[in-house]
Image (spheres, rainbow, N blue to C red):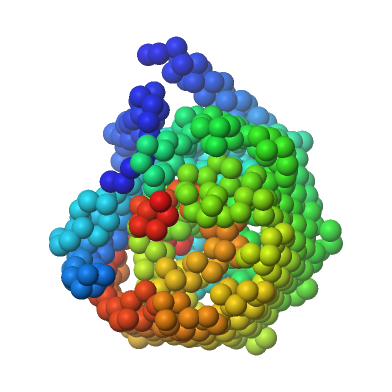
C-alpha cells in the first residue's frame, strides 16, 4: 500500500470515529433511511400526513412540498443535506438528471412520464442555442464538467 | 466509451480502489446477513430512428440501453447500505455515439447513516451536494452534527469528470468541507470550502461558499448561496430568494441571482463555455419569481417569470414569462396540463414562444400518455420559424414489478424536416422490505 493510501485510510478512520462519537451523544433522531410507509403515486405533498413542524431534517415539512417552487429550487435544500431526499428517492432517481455522463435526454428517459418536469423537451438541439446564450449558468451546472460526447459535433 | 479525463495513473488506481472497495464491502455484509433489504431496478430501452445526412445518405440507428440500479439497506442488521447505478449502450446498427458501445458507472458506494444526529458517511463513487460542492466523486464523505447544533462535513477523493475534448484532463483531486450551525425549524447557516487540483485555465479550482436558510416567520423563508472564486478573486455566483407559504395550497418564491462568466466557467471542461464561444467578461443578473397555487383541490395554476440582464449588449437582456394549469385526477395517478411561455429579448434571434400540453390516463393495468410541444422562433433558424414534437406512449403492467411500454415520437424542427423515432421500454422493479420509494 502506498504512503498516500495509508494516509487516506487513516484520515477516513479518524473521520468515522468522530462521526460515531459526535452522533452517539446526540439526542436528535436521524431522518429515517427509508420512508416508513408506501407513498402514493403523484407529486408528493408532505403536509397531507405531516403537520407543519420541524423534524430531524431541521426544516418544516412545508418546505418540502413538491410544488413548482420546490422543484425549481430543490438544489437549495439538497445542498444542506441530501439525507431527507434519500428517505423517499432512491439515489438512482437523482441520477436520472444528475448523471455524471449521459447520452439519453431526461425527457427521452421519462417519455412515459410527461407529468414529471424533465428538461429539454422537443428538439432541444435548436432551442439550447437560445437558452444557452441567455442563461449559460443554468447549462453549466450539469454540462460544465460532466459532458455528453455528442456535444463535440458542434463544440470543438 | 468517449474520452474521459482520467489521465494520471494514480487517479486511475484510486478510482479502481474505491470502486472495488465499495463493491466488495457489501458482499462481506451480504454473506453474514441474508435479511438485508434489497431492491433492484432495471430499465431497458431499445430505440430505432433514421437520420438523413448532409450528402443525402441515410443512417439507421438502433441503440440498446440498459440502466441498472441496486440498493441494499440494513446490511447485517446495521445502518450500513450499498447503492449502485450504471448504464451501458450497444448499437445494433450504425454507431449512434462515439463508437458502437458506451456506458458509465454513475455510483457504487457504501453508506452509513447513524440512527442519531443525522451523521452519515459515504465511501466509493457517489454524487453529493454540500455547500459549494455539487460533485460526483471517487472518495469519501462524512457529515455530523453535535447536540449544540454545530456540525461539519468533509469530503475528499478524485472527481469524476468527462471532457468532450481529446487530451483534456480534469482535476486530479478534490477535497473540502462545510462548517455549519443549525437550529431546528429556525435557521441553518454554513460556510464551505472546496479545492480541486487541476489544470483549469492554468489554476486550481478553489471556492469559498456560504449558505443560509432562515425561517423569518412561520410562512416566510429566506435562502441564500454564494460562492467566491479564489483563483479569479471575485464572486463566482450568488442566489438569494424569499419563499412565502401563506397557506397549505399557495407557494410563492422571488429572488435574485447573479454570476460572472470568468469566475463561474473558469473550471469548465466543455468548450461551449470558453471564449470565443462566450465573452468571458460578461456577467449576468437574474430577477425571478414563481407562484404555485392550488386554487381548488386537484387544480393548480403555475406562473413564473424572470428578467435576465447581461453586461454585454450581445447577447443582451431578455424576459421569460410562463403560465400553466395542471389537473391531477384518478387518485393522483394521472395528470394533465397546458402551459405557454414567451421569451422577449433585446435581440431578435433570442426570442421565441412555446406552448405545451400533456395528459396521462391509467385504466387498470394500462398506462397511456400524450405530450405535445410547439415552439415559434422570432427569427428563422435554418430557414424555419417553428418546431414541434409529439410523443405518444402506451404501456401495460404484466406483473406488479414489470411494465412494458412503447413510445412513438414525431419531431419537425430546423434540424430535421421530419424525424420519427420508436422506443420500447422494459421496466423491472424487484424489492424486499417495506417502505416507500420514489424511483
Residue B311: x %, y % from top left: 72, 59
Q: Position of residue B90 (x, y in %)?
A: 20, 55
Residue at image coords 55%, 50% = B275
Residue drawn at x 68%, y 46% is B236
Q: Is residue B243 left or right of residue B15?
A: right
- Name the residue nearer the viewer: B438 or B197: B197
Q: Is residue B358 left or right of residue B246?
A: left
For residue B289, say whether it is visible: yes
Q: Position of residue B293 (x, y in %)?
A: 68, 80
Q: Quadrant of residue B278?
A: bottom right
| Above or below: residue A151 compared with residue B129 | below
Quarter occupied by residue A136:
bottom right
Q: Quadrant of the C terminus of chain B?
A: bottom left
Residue A36 visible here: no
User: Residue at (50%, 84%) from the top-left corner?
Assistant: B376
Residue B380 or residue B66, whichever sits in front: B380
Hey, which residue is sitting farthest left in the picture? B93
Amino acid at each position: 500500500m502506498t504512503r498516500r493510501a495509508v494516509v487516506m485510510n487513516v484520515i477516513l478512520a479518524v473521520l468515522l470515529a468522530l462521526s460515531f462519537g459526535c452522533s452517539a451523544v446526540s439526542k436528535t433522531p436521524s431522518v429515517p433511511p427509508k420512508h416508513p410507509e408506501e407513498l402514493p403515486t403523484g407529486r408528493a405533498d408532505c403536509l397531507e400526513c405531516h403537520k407543519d413542524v420541524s423534524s430531524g431534517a431541521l426544516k418544516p415539512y412545508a418546505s418540502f412540498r413538491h410544488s413548482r417552487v420546490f422543484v425549481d429550487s430543490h438544489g437549495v435544500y439538497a445542498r444542506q443535506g441530501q439525507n431527507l431526499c434519500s428517505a423517499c428517492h432512491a439515489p438512482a432517481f437523482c441520477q436520472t438528471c444528475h448523471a455524471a455522463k449521459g447520452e439519453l435526454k431526461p425527457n427521452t428517459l421519462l417519455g412515459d412520464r410527461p407529468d414529471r418536469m424533465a428538461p429539454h423537451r422537443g428538439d432541444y438541439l435548436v432551442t439550447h442555442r437560445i437558452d444557452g446564450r441567455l442563461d449559460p449558468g443554468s447549462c453549466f451546472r450539469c454540462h460544465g464538467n460532466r459532458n455528453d460526447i455528442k456535444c463535440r459535433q458542434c463544440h470543438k | 466509451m468517449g474520452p474521459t479525463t482520467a489521465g494520471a495513473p494514480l487517479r486511475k488506481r484510486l478510482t479502481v480502489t474505491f470502486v472495488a472497495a465499495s463493491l466488495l464491502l457489501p458482499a462481506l455484509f451480504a454473506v453474514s446477513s441474508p435479511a438485508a433489504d434489497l431492491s433492484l431496478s432495471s430499465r431497458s430501452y431499445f430505440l430505432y430512428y433514421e437520420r438523413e445526412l448532409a450528402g443525402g445518405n441515410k443512417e439507421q440507428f438502433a441503440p440498446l440501453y440498459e440502466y441498472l440500479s441496486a440498493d441494499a439497506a440494513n446490511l447485517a442488521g446495521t445502518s450500513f447500505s450499498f447503492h449502485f447505478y450504471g448504464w451501458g449502450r450497444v448499437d445494433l446498427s450504425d454507431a449512434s455515439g462515439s463508437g458502437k458501445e458506451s456506458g458509465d458507472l454513475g455510483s457504487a458506494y457504501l453508506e452509513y447513516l447513524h440512527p442519531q444526529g443525522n451523521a452519515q458517511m459515504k465511501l466509493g463513487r457517489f454524487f453529493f451536494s454540500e455547500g459549494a460542492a455539487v460533485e460526483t466523486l471517487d472518495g469519501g464523505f462524512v457529515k455530523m452534527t453535535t447536540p449544540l447544533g454545530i456540525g461539519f462535513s468533509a469530503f475528499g477523493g478524485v472527481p469524476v469528470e468527462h471532457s468532450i475534448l481529446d487530451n483534456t484532463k480534469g482535476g486530479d483531486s478534490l477535497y473540502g468541507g462545510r462548517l455549519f450551525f443549525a437550529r431546528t425549524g429556525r435557521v441553518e447557516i454554513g460556510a464551505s470550502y472546496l479545492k480541486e487540483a487541476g489544470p483549469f485555465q492554468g489554476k486550481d479550482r478553489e471556492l469559498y461558499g456560504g449558505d443560509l436558510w432562515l425561517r423569518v416567520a412561520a410562512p416566510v423563508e429566506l435562502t441564500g448561496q454564494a460562492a467566491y472564486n479564489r483563483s479569479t478573486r471575485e464572486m463566482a455566483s450568488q442566489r438569494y430568494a424569499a419563499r412565502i407559504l401563506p397557506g397549505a395550497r399557495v407557494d410563492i418564491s422571488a429572488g435574485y441571482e447573479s454570476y460572472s462568466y470568468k469566475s463561474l466557467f473558469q473550471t469548465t471542461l466543455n468548450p461551449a463555455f470558453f471564449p470565443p464561444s462566450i465573452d468571458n467578461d460578461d456577467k449576468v443578473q437574474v430577477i425571478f419569481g414563481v407562484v404555485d397555487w392550488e386554487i381548488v383541490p386537484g387544480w393548480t395554476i403555475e406562473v413564473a417569470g424572470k428578467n435576465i440582464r447581461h453586461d454585454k449588449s450581445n447577447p443582451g437582456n431578455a424576459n421569460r414569462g410562463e403560465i400553466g394549469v395542471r389537473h391531477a385526477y384518478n387518485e393522483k395517478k394521472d395528470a394533465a396540463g397546458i402551459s405557454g411561455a414567451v421569451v422577449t429579448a433585446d435581440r431578435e434571434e433570442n426570442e421565441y414562444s412555446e406552448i405545451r400540453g400533456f395528459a396521462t390516463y391509467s385504466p387498470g393495468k394500462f398506462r397511456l400518455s400524450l405530450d405535445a410541444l410547439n415552439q415559434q422562433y422570432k427569427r428563422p433558424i435554418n430557414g424555419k420559424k417553428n418546431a414541434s414534437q409529439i410523443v405518444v406512449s402506451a404501456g401495460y403492467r404484466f406483473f406488479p414489478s414489470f411494465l412494458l411500454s412503447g413510445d412513438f415520437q414525431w419531431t419537425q424542427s430546423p434540424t430535421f424536416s421530419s424525424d420519427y423515432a420508436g422506443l420500447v421500454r422494459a421496466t423491472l422493479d424487484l424489492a424486499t422490505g417495506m417502505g416507500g420509494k420514489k424511483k
